[in-house]
Image (cartoon, rainbow, N blue to C red):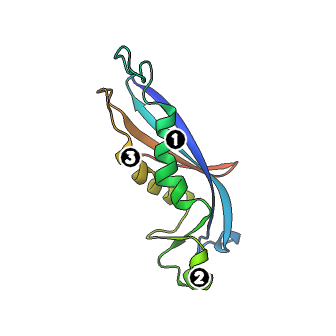
Amino acid sequence: MTTTIRRFVETDTGHRVPNHKSKCRHMHGHRYRFEAEISGDVVAETGVSEEGMLMDFSDVSSILMEHVHDVVDHAFVVYSGDTDARSALELMGTEHRTVVVDFIPTAENLAKWAFEQVAPHVQSVYGNRLRLVAMHCRETPKSVATWRP
């Protein structure tokens, strides 16, 4: 039987959805929560640090911090084709953190992006079939997008 764990990081990140029919077309930000969902078998090897776990939660946190949090926290994520926003952000110079992506930064697309950043780093050390099965991106307290391969 497979077990599942979840661990999350939160970021303060700006974006805009340039073609949105309402106010999301304006530059704004969110307190995003990126939550990794990992499945596998509980480690049965006696005497190892991960005995009884899928993966140490602190190891999951380290991966999320390095590959998601530290990339987009206190940054503005902008679509490469959004020339108006890119021009405005360029006026701020090098003191501003801008992350240019090849997709419109909706919660759905950010969930997929985060999945792609994290998945290669979730590896079985004890043959316990670890894999990232989903990435959840909470944009607001009432709005969550999930990406699964």
CA gap, disc 3 to disc 2?
33 Å
Give left or right: position of 69 versus 25.
left
**Label 2's element?**
helix
Identified at 32% across, 33% down, the residue is 124
Q: Of 56 and 144, which appears nearest the observer? A: 56
**Label 1's element?**
helix
Q: Of 74 and 79, which appears nearest the observer? A: 74
Is any part of residue 111 visible from this angle?
no
Give left or right: position of 84 versus 116.
right
CA gap, disc 1 to disc 2?
31 Å
Q: Which residue is mark 1?
A: 61
Q: Which mark is first along the chain, 2 or 3?
A: 2
Q: Amino acid at mark 2?
A: Gly
Q: Which residue is mark 3?
A: 119
Q: Amino acid at mark 1?
A: Ser
Q: Amino acid at mark 3?
A: Ala
Q: Which mark is residue 80?
A: none
Is any part of residue 79 visible from this angle?
yes
The local crowd at label 1, few if under 14, some if 14 to 19, many if 20 or more residues have their Cα within 10 Å, is: some
Q: Which residue is mark 2?
A: 93
Give left or right: position of 106 versus 118.
right
Q: Of 112 and 119, which appears nearest the observer? A: 119
Location of residue 38 with respect to 149 vertically, above or below = above
Circle count: 3
Q: Where residue 45 appears, x then y in whole percent?
A: 34, 17
Mark 3 and 2 residues: CB-CB less than 8 Å, in contact? no
Identified at 32% across, 31% down, the residue is 125
Location of residue 77 with respect to 41 vertically, above or below = below
Q: Which mark is first along the chain, 2 or 1?
A: 1
Q: Quadrant of residue 123?
A: top left
